[in-house]
Image: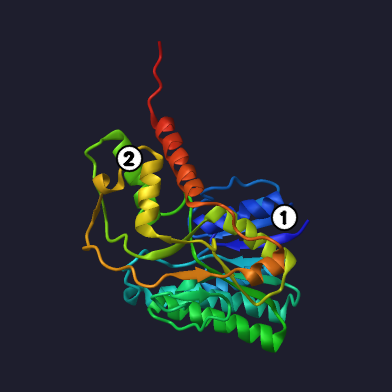
Amino acid sequence: MPHSLVLGVNGQDGSFLAEALLARGHHVVGVGRDASSRYLTPSESYRYVQLDVSDTEALATLLRSLPLDSAFHFAVLHGASDFSYEPVWDKMVKTNVASLHTLLEHARTAVPDLRVVYAGSRKIFPEPLHGVIDETTPAQASCLYSIGKMAARDLIQHYVRHHGIRATNVVLFHHESPRRQPQYLFPTIVHGILAAKDDPRHRTKVRTLDFWIDWGAADEFMDIVADIAEQTDEPELVLASGRTWYARAVAERLFERYGLAAEQHLEEARPTSSPGETFQVRLDRLERAIGRTPQKQVEDIADSMIRAAERQASEKQPMVHD
């Protein structure tokens, strides 16, 4: 049975990744800051460890105590659009970068065959995105968050090149699920649909819908990450849906799917402007490496989020006794 470590297991990505690994027969140790496991129940195959990965000494001690075949760094300090990283720079660097260095050093000094996979970010590609985007697209930091992701990317390239470590930076584009935090745009749109179904007068405020975006499904992305760990040693792979959407068109499409008109229920803070040039993410290298690319559509993501919200609402309903 392969032994895997998932840092950030209580987050959207880490939890789906742990589930994908368990389904493949892995023994998984999940690490998170919370006192208990949020989505997965401890079992013979899954153990939860409470640990803040910014404490690199504690992380190194944990690594030395575990038999490991693979380690997935999906712990991240990250916020939605306009989040200010300046006040949390030190914490972000320790969480997003220094803990990755701890993993890579453990591989270099103790477990040379350790497979390390890191959750990179499309933020390494400067805005606005345009043309074809793939692993050959020049990277450039544009904010403090992307500076950290660039540093992590460079760390991986260094350890691959100079020490032969089997590490991959997975450059993740937007991916959504019922576990996505509500302040992000896609959950905001979905919650707007739910609210409008209950109250025809409800209006949901969004910042803007005038931009191009590649949106995928988090559960499918993380299943693909498991494939990447098992099937290839590529040092960098872009992971996206490969389908570019105009955000306004997505909102209109999803509201219409539920018999609603987006213009009646969405209120934009910014006046309408030109969305600029579009872009296309090319997944040729990913398909060559593992033989698959994401297939889920935005409708699949929205449907899963709405079903989850309705299920959660029904579970909160008080039981009526005859």
Q: Quadrant of the C terminus?
A: top left
Badge 1 element = loop
Residue count near mark 1 (Cα–Cα under 10 Å), binned few <14, some 14–19, many ≥20: many
Q: Is residue 27 left or right of residue 103?
A: right
Q: Is residue 304 left or right of residue 294?
A: left
Q: Is residue 255 left or right of residue 35?
A: left
Residue 142 shows in the view: yes
Q: Quadrant of the N terminus?
A: bottom right
Which residue is rendered at x = 68% and y = 87% of the image? Answer: 161
Which residue is rendered at x = 70% and y = 81% of the image? Answer: 108
Which residue is rendered at x = 46% and y = 77% of the image? Answer: 125
Q: Is residue 300 left or right of residue 197?
A: right
Query: In which image quadrant can residue 309 be found?
Result: top left
Place of residue 281 in the rendered image (x, y in percent of width and height, measured from the top left): 53, 69
Place of residue 271 in the rendered image (x, y in percent of width and height, measured from the top left): 21, 63
Q: Residue furthest top?
A: 322
Q: Are marks 2 and 1 in contact (CB under 8 Å)?
A: no
The residue singled out by tag 1 in the image is: 26
Relative to residue 10, is residue 193 depicted above or below? above
Given residues 282 and 54, the one toward you in this image is: 282
Badge 2 element = loop
Relative to residue 55, is residue 39 depicted above or below? above
Query: What's the amino acid at mark 2?
Result: Leu
Which residue is rendered at x = 39% and y = 18% of the image? Answer: 320
Given residues 289 and 70, the one toward you in this image is: 289
Residue count near mark 2 (Cα–Cα under 10 Å), binned few <14, some 14–19, many ≥20: some
Q: Foreground mark, 2 or 1?
A: 2
Numbered tag placed on residue 260 in the rendering = 2
